[in-house]
Amino acid sequence: GENVEQHPSTLSVQEGDSAVIKCTYSDSASNYFPWYKQELGKRPQLIIDIRSNVGEKKDQRIAVTLNKTAKHFSLHITETQPEDSAVYFCAALNQAGTALIFGKGTTLSVSS
Amino acid sequence: DGGITQSPKYLFRKEGQNVTLSCEQNLNHDAMYWYRQDPGQGLRLIYYSQIVNDFQKGDIAEGYSVSREKKESFPLTVTSAQKNPTAFYLCASDLRGTEAFFGQGTRLTVV
């Protein structure tokens, strides 16, 4: 089945710096790759997603890139702020396109 | 609040007992999921259902059971066969291949 690897597991940056989280997936048939943010004690919420027909998508300070050939996708956060501190999860649809498979998460800490 | 509700928020179970976690959605989503979250393990798929009266095992289905008798409801039973049930359980729903919405989660503790 689909397997999603996510790195790093923890990431600490200074306010204003950029943060990059990387994920790889195993199933070349996967075509949907969302990113979720989970703040402490809260439910995961979608922050951005990308489909396999595009290579990059941007929404204000966050962007996601997709390399289908290499089967990896990345989340980029620019001008980080303390409120960006959270756990971030990448995900990919499984082979049948029926369920999301998540990475293990990255704990991002932004210090002011 | 997101249209998907889990209950209870906290649940305590004695060893050897079965316990059922509730998940209800009013988003008219076809697909519903159960994930387990442990520290450092991310979100692991337990079961999912794409349609009423049908469901499939995820990566860690052993010791769990589900039913999907109604589109709105997807309860998860943690059986006594689950060796390490203490965890945070998240239910989600989506319209196949679109944004998944999560419930607020149930924290299960075995005492």
Image (cartoon, rainbow, N blue to C red):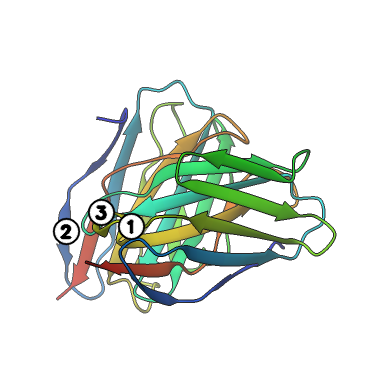
Chain bearing mark 3: A
Hey, what amino acid is under mark 1?
Answer: Tyr
Chain bearing mark 2: B
SS of the residue under disc 1? strand
Residue behind mark 3: A83
Q: Residue at horizontal 27%, vertical 72%?
A: B86
- Please tell me whether mark 2 or mark 1 is closer to you in this view: 1
Are circles 1 and 3 on residues that touch, CB within 8 Å? no
Left or right: residue A87 versus residue B8 is right
Q: Decide which of B96, B71 is in the foreground and name it.
A: B96
Residue behind mark 2: B11
Q: Residue at horizontal 24%, vertical 67%?
A: B17
Horizontal and vertical percent position of residue B85: 32, 71
Q: Decide which of B98, B91 is in the foreground and name it.
A: B98
Disc 1 crowd rating (10 Å Cα; few below 14, some 14-19, many 20+) is many
SS of the residue under disc 2? strand
Disc 3 crowd rating (10 Å Cα; few below 14, some 14-19, many 20+) is few
Hey, what amino acid is under mark 2?
Answer: Leu
Disc number placed over residue B89 in the picture, else none? 1
Horizontal and vertical percent position of residue A105: 45, 67
Q: Label 1 vs label 3: CA separation?
A: 25 Å
Q: Residue at horizontal 31%, vertical 31%?
A: B2
Q: Is residue A26 visible?
A: yes
Q: Residue at horizontal 36%, vertical 57%?
A: A80
Q: Label 2 vs label 3: CA separation?
A: 30 Å
- Please tell me whether mark 1 or mark 3 is closer to you in this view: 3
Query: Does residue B26 lie above or below B40 as drawn?
Result: above
